[in-house]
Image (tube, rainbow, N blue to C red):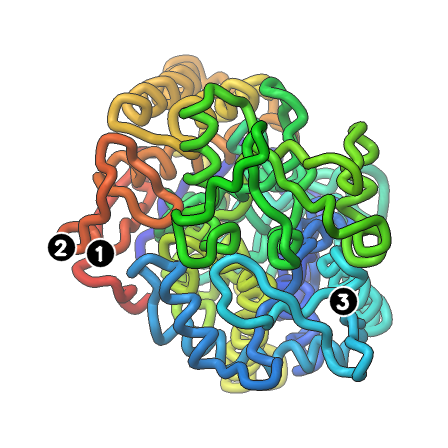
Amino acid sequence: MTSTGIRLHAPAPGWSIEADVVVVGSGVAGLTAALRCDAAGLRTVVVTKARLDDGSTRWAQGGIAAALGEGDTPEQHLDDTLVAGAGLCDEDAVRLLVTEGPDAVRRLIGTGAHFDESEAGGLELTREGGHHRRRIAHAGGDATGAEISRALVEAVRARGLRTVENALVLDLLTDAAGRTAGVTLHVMGEGQHDGVGAVHAPAVVLATGGMGQVFSATTNPSVSTGDGVALALRAGAEVSDLEFVQFHPTVLFLGADAEGQQPLVSEAVRGEGAHLVDAAGERFMVGQHELAELAPRDIVAKGITRRMQEQGAEHMYLDARHFGAHMWENRFPTILAACRAHGIDPVTEPIPVAPAAHYASGGVRTDSRGRTTVPGLYACGEVACTGVHGANRLASNSLLEGLVYAERIAADIADRHGEDGSHARVPSPVERPDRPAHPLLAAEARFAIQRIMTDGAGVLRSAASLETAADRLQRLHSDARDALDAHGKTAEPGVDTWEATNLLCVARVLVAAARLREETRGCHWREDRAERDDAAWRRHIVVRLDPDRSLAVHTTDTPDFPPT
C-alpha cells in the first residue's frame, strides 16, 4: 500500500487528543467497537458527525437477522445470504457472520437492548425478503434501530467513554512508515473543542455509515455523505463493489421531485403479509419469484420498476389494509405515524411506494478482522466491504454485520495493543503536505451530483447513461482541479464543501465500477446487459485513488478477496 498524500483543504489542527484507538461513527458498528475496545482497557475516543444517536442505525426499522428460532440454523442463514448475494459473497465471511451472529445478538441484549417477545416469553421473530425462516428479531414493533442505538448510547455514557460529537472527520494521519497515526476532524459548534483538530492514535476504526446522499432520494439521513470511503481512498486504501447500491423497493412515494431522506416502509410489512399491487389492485410479484413479495430486494425493486415502466406510473402500492388498525398500531407504529404525517392512512388505503437508494453493499475492502489495506486502519458496518453482502445485501444482515465485525476488530486491536505493552506508542504523524491536495467543490455541487447519479446510475443503468454520468462528474472534478492547479484556488473549506467533495469522490468510483461491470447482477441492473455473466464477472471490482487524483480500477481473479 502506498499513501496518496492527498488531503482535503483544511486549516491545520489547532488542538489534539491522544488515544489508543479512535472510532469514527456512532451506529451499531462504531459503538460496539468502542465498548469492546474500552472493555479491553484501551483508551478509546468516539468521534461522530452529529449526536451519538443520529446515525443510520436508529432509522433501521425491520430488525436484526440471526439463527435464533427453533429449527433454524446458521447453515440455513448462510444459504439465504449466498442466494441474495448473487454469486459474489465471500463464503468464509458469511459463515463467520452467521456462526458468530447469534451470540453477538445475545451480547447486545446483555448490553441492554430489549427486543419484542412472544406470549411464550421468547424472542418474537419475523420474516423479510430472501429469508426462508422467521429469524428477524425486532424491537418496538418497527423501531429496532432506535432501541439498539438507545442501549448502546446509554452503555457508552455509563462507561464514561470520551466522545466528540458534531465532528466531521477529514483525513487519516500516517506516520513516516505509512502506518495509521490518527485522524483530523472539524468540530462544529461550541464545546470543549472547536474547529479543526486531531486525534492521535495507532488504530482508527471507520464506522461512518453509508453514502445514500449521493442520490436525490434515499432512506439515509443527511449525514450519509460517503465520508469514510472518501477518507480511505485519499489514504490509499482499496474499496470494492461500490457499484452494488441497494435500492429499497418500498419507500413512501412523496412525489417525483422529492429529494433528501424519504420515509422507509420496512420489508417487515411484507414479511407480515402485505401485498404489492398496481393501481388496478393486481399483485404483480406473484409468478415472478417463488417468494413473491418476499423475494430478495433487488428482484422486488426490479419488479416494481418494470411495472412502473409498463404502465407509465410513478409508483406502485403496498396494500396492508387487511392488517387492521390494531396490528398497524402495535406492530408498525413508526411507519403508521410517518404515513399519516404525509396524509396516507395504511389502515384504510394502500401506501404509494417506489424504490429509493438505501444501502451500499460495497465499501472499504477489509479482511475477516476488519483490517483494510492501510496498516492500522479498520472499517466495519456499511462503510466496509467484508464480502458478506456480495452483489445484494440480504434483509437485516446489516445490523448483524456491524455487531460481528466490530467485535472482531476490537479483539484484533486489543491483541496488537497487548503485543506492544500496556500502552502502545502513540505515533507521530508526518507533516501535512501542501500538495497534492484534494480540490474542494462549492456546496451547491452536492445537488448537481445527486441529479447526475439519479439520472445515470440509479435503479436502471446502461452504457449510455453511465457514460453521460461519468462525463458530467469528470467535468465537476476537472473544473475544481484546474482551478486549484492553475490558481491555487478552491472553494472555502467548510462542512458543506467537504461533504460535496466527498460525494463527488464516491460518485466517481461508483460510476467507474458500474461502467466496467457489463452485466446485470444483484442490485446492479444494466438494461443493455440484462443477463448475469459468471464466466466474465463472478469477481470483484477494486478501486484505488492514485496520487494524481485519477482512479486505478482492477478486477480480482476470483470471487474471493485477496488478503489485505
Q: Position of residue 380 (x, y in %)?
A: 53, 62
**344 over 531 or under it: above or below:** above
Q: Position of residue 18 (x, y in %)?
A: 67, 63
- Which residue is drawn at the image coordinates 70% and 81% (left, top)? 39
Residue at which label 3 appears: 152
> Which residue sits at x=64%, y=62%?
30
Work out how far the residue at label 1 is from the one at label 2, CA to CA, in angstroms: 6 Å
Q: Residue at x 43, y 22 (%)?
A: 455
Label 3 amino acid? Leu
Q: Nearer the viewer, mark 2 or mark 3?
A: 2
Q: Residues within 10 Å of mark 1 (few under 14, many from 20)?
A: many
Farthest residue to the left: give it. 535
* Residue 543 percent location from the top left of the image: 31, 46
Marks counted in the figure total 3
Callout 1, which amino acid? Arg
Instruction: Name the side, left or right, on which 477 lies relative to 219.
Output: left
Q: Nearer the viewer, residue 147 or 53?
A: 147
User: Residue 115 lies in what quarter of the image?
Assistant: bottom right
Mark 2: amino acid: Ala
Q: Secondary structure at mark 3?
A: helix
Q: Earlier in the sequence, mark 3 or mark 1?
A: 3
User: Which mark sits nearer the N-terminus, 2 or 3?
Assistant: 3
Which numbered dot is residue 535? 2
Find out whether the residues at labels 2 and 3 contact each other: C-beta distance under 8 Å.
no
Reading the image, the residue beneath label 1 is 538
Looking at the image, which is closer to me, 276 or 554? 276
Between 417 and 151, the one lying in front of the other is: 151
Q: Residue at x 61, y 52 (%)?
A: 270
Give how far across and how far down residue 334 sits, in percent: 79, 48
